Image (cartoon, rainbow, N blue to C red):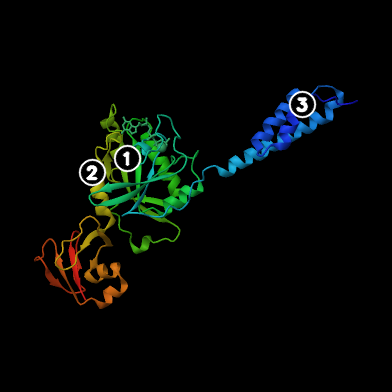
Amino acid sequence: MPANLTPIYKEAEERYRRATDDNERLAALKEMLAVIPKHKGTDKLQGEIKAKIAKLKKSRSAKKGGTRQKAPDNIPKEGAAQIPLVGAPNCGKSQFLATLTNARPDIADYPYTTRIPTTAMMEWENIKFQLIDLPPVALASYEGWMKSLLFRADVIFLFADLSSDDLIDDVQTILNMLDYQQINLVNPDFEREEDQLTLDKVWKKTFLLANKYDCDEEDIRLGFLTEAFGDRFPIYKINALTGEGSDELKERLFDSLGLIRIYTKTPGRDAYMTDPVLLMQPATVADAAYHIHKDFAHKLTYARIWGEGKFDGQRVQKDFQIADGDILEFHL
Ligand SMILES: Nc1nc2c(ncn2[C@@H]2O[C@H](COP(=O)(O)OP(=O)(O)OP(=O)(O)O)[C@@H](O)[C@H]2O)c(=O)[nH]1
Ligand SMILES: [Mg+2]
């Protein structure tokens, strides 16, 4: 039986031949299918068009899947510490990030808003901490890349939601899940003893953030939270909408890192106080010089120091212990 194709069909077919991308091809094929005379003589042709449409749709959705944003399992560290925000759905992690940094993550009053990590810098005095907003740590969303990020973290901010009656269970579930992953959350003051050294377990200094401290019955729930976890973690009352409570937290965070800030100057000039060198405690004049340049440390003969408990410009040797806020002038 002849197909008897109409001019309107032939036009659509011509468009299909000339199409330069899959969207145009798909649109033309659909039109061909819509206008093709429907009788026995075109059955085979209709089948071919349908098969082409199906193939194109499949390849388009495969491409879409391929370009979907992928979560990284390693985020290069910046600033004084890398700190993932860990918590149950909806506890206010993204709100905290939005209020304390320049980032603008999605925030919503429904769970599972955050799907991939967002990184942003939180300022404190003249240094910055790197926060990572994560999807909730819950069975429904926990993926391998999250484990990798948590393994690399310097400190963890664990969130509890003071507006939720489930807050104790939520925190406990997270602790259990992470424990199962060999990630043990500990008090920032915790010092690991030699006999606690295990190769397959990591220990992460953790602050418990009791968020939504502006909600109804917040003090009652805070009481339950303190009873359950107050011995294990320091608890900070936070209002992520305003940032209230975060100053105290940031100060304690810096203390927990065991870092000191050192400033350098050249003779006859003032020190540049906005850009400190960060060193692990305990540190000496030689460590500070080494941080600036390896050769510098070798050539150094002495330094002059300004800081608490020292005479201004006091002459010190390489092995002199330095403290947070000291200004150093190196002499070769
Ligand atoms: N009243 C009050 N509401 C808050 C506070 N922090 C967050 N919220 C609100 O709680 C809801 C959830 O906040 P999100 O920041 O999206 O929560 P999340 O933890 O990132 O949620 P997921 O991405 O789903 O894990 C939003 O409507 C926020 O505005 C707070 O301290 N007080
Ligand atoms: Mg979020």
Q: Which residue is mark 2?
A: 247
Q: Which residue is mark 1?
A: 228
The mark found on residue 9 in the picture is 3
Most extreme residue toward the left, as rendered? 311
Residue closest to the eye, 56 or 157? 56
Q: Earlier in the sequence, mark 2 or mark 3?
A: 3
Most extreme residue toward the right, as rendered? 1
**For numbered disc 2, what is the local secondary structure?**
helix
Q: Quadrant of ligand 1?
A: top left
**Residue drawn 63% across the image and 38% down it:** 61
Foreground mark, 2 or 3?
3
Percent across and percent down for residue 55 are 71, 37
Foreground mark, 2 or 1?
2
**For numbered disc 1, what is the local secondary structure?**
helix
**Residue drawn 64% across the image and 35% down it:** 23
Percent across and percent down for residue 166 are 38, 32
Are the residues flagged by discs 2 and 3 in contact, CB closer than 8 Å? no
Q: Earlier in the sequence, mark 2 or mark 1?
A: 1
Percent across and percent down for residue 219 are 25, 31
Q: Is the C terminus in the top left, top right, bottom left or bottom right quadrant?
A: bottom left
What distance separates the C-alpha of mark 2 from that of mark 3?
70 Å
The mark found on residue 302 in the picture is none
Q: Residues within 10 Å of mark 2 (few under 14, many from 20)?
A: few
Quarter of the image holding residue 79? bottom left
